Image: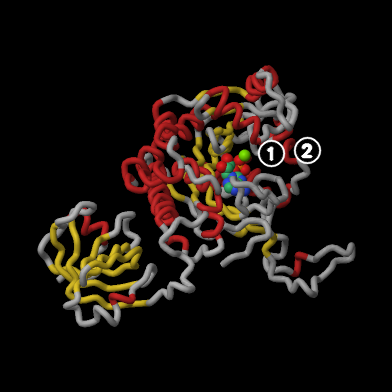
Amino acid sequence: MEKRLRIKTILAAKPLDREIEIHGWLKSKRESKGLAFLDITDGSTLAGLQVVADESLSNFTTDVARLTTGCSVAVRGLLVASPAKGQEVELHARQIRVHGWAPPDSYPLQKKRHTFEFLRSVAHLRGRTNSLGAVARVRSRLSWAIHLFFQQRGFFQIHTPIITTSDCEGAGEMFTVTALDLDRLPRNDAGSVDYSLDFFGRPASLTVSGQLEAESYALALGNVYTFGPTFRAENSNTSRHLAEFWMVEPEMAFCDLEDDMDLAEEMLKFLIADCLANCGAEMDLFARFIDKDLPARLDNVLQHPFVRLSYTEAVKELQNCGRSFTFPVAWGIDLQSEHERYLAETLCGRPVIVTDYPQSIKPFYMRCNDDGRTVAAMDILFPGIGEIIGGSQREERFAQLKERMEQAAIPLENYEWYLDLRRYGTAPHAGFGLGFERLIQFVTGMGNIRDVIPFPRTPGSSTI
Ligand code: 4AD
Ligand code: MG
């Protein structure tokens, strides 16, 4: 007898007329004429397995008849071809054991459609629903596909630190990490906190990006990537922002902006195609219940090259399009989400890569273009999402980088190691960061970023 068989394996292999044992949770139950039909799911796949139980089971009235949605059970029985419509196989139970009850008067997940908002309030249970379970499986597959993509191309994964003393994006949106007693902070003569007495002897934070450390290893191993959690203390309460999100950041030596964009486009297409090929049932569910236009939108991304547009051209398009935006458009502004969405959704109707932004609105590490006022930056804007990737060619010239850092008032003493990368064997290099949750949003059609990460962290929220 095969124990602990997963339903996914059973449905794929259909080991008919064999005794097997499964474990899972009851989704629903139907009773008729001394028979109980149990729809059991074990999370391995969207589909459930139908279990047929009859009164000959010794615990039919004491246990089986009392089962409700959410109870967990072990079922031993014979897998047979199903005579009824709706499923190819069913399990005729010879023994049913109850692992755990789920009292219907208190179990929050009943067999009906719950709103995503409600499900967020039971984040520890919502993975058991069809939609959030499907998101979790897609998330796992996309994570794996990221490794596949880079490993197949000879990239090395670098584990960049989570605790850091550098502010990569220079935006000051970092969460402090300290071992000081917050009720009794040591002060220096000037009255500020004396971080020399803190754990690291200076201020430390959670990383906003692994890029700077990835650059160091790109300039040693050539092509590398880092994929991990990043943290931003920005007070953005939108359906696209999290305080803790995952980012994929490749970094390549001897690489310019053009190569960088090519890789980003290839990667996004690879990831979407991989998900379509490996998560068929989940993708069908999203198309049916979340967004009926999803298949067409994904196909549109796969079929066409991304539009490439300079920031200066994008600004002209926005100024001449005849729309009035909440944030007025002028050369030098940072593009707002309404502008990004106009470009991707209305102007181009597909992903757009906007390049060569003004230096003044981008971080210090981006390479200055010959015009002296723009940098070799690129943002990839997706319909319905806005910015999904931000990247650039890095400033590899020592003098230019140092000048930029001084202008930006960056404390050079903390970044000597970063300058060393330009002092010794510097090389042109480039990379980008993909917001993993925004990718999952695009692939699944889920409207709110809080629903594509198991336990979302957002301003003011503190569940689990
Ligand atoms: O554009 P960002 O800030 O770029 C960087 O951090 C670079 N250091 C990346 C690099 O070149 N290696 O962030 C990259 C991406 C954005 O395009 C967006 O998709 C996502 O990360 N992102 C967020 N996702 C969810 N919540 C937030 N608060 C996010 N901030 C950025
Ligand atoms: Mg950005």
Instruction: Determine whether label 1 and label 2 are within 8 Å by CB.
Output: yes
Q: Residue 323 lies in what quarter of the image?
A: top right
Residue at 73 percent across and 40 percent down: it is 405
User: Label 1: how many residues lie within 10 Å, few (<14), some (14-19) or many (20+)?
Assistant: many
Q: CA distance from mark 1 to mark 2?
A: 9 Å
| Badge 1 amino acid | Phe
Q: Which structural element holds mark 2?
A: helix
In the picture as drawn, the residue positioned furthest to the right comes out as 190
* Residue 389 in the image, given as x and y percentages of width and height: 55, 38
Front residue of 420/380: it is 380
Say which residue label 1 marks: 364
Above or below, comparing residue 448 to residue 306 in the picture? below
Above or below, comparing residue 97 to residue 217 in the picture? below
User: Label 2: how many residues lie within 10 Å, few (<14), some (14-19) or many (20+)?
Assistant: few
Residue at 31 percent across and 41 percent down: it is 277
Upstream in sequence: badge 1 or badge 2:
1
Quarter of the picture holding the C terminus: bottom right
Q: Residue 24 lies in what quarter of the image?
A: bottom left
Query: Is residue 3 found left or right of 209 in the rendered image?
Result: left
Query: Is residue 267 found left or right of 451 in the rendered image?
Result: left
Residue at 53 percent across and 33 percent down: it is 383
Q: Quadrant of ligand 2?
A: top right
| Badge 2 amino acid | Gln
Say which residue label 2 marks: 407
CB of mark 2 near ligand 1 (< 8 Å): no
Front residue of 408/380: it is 380
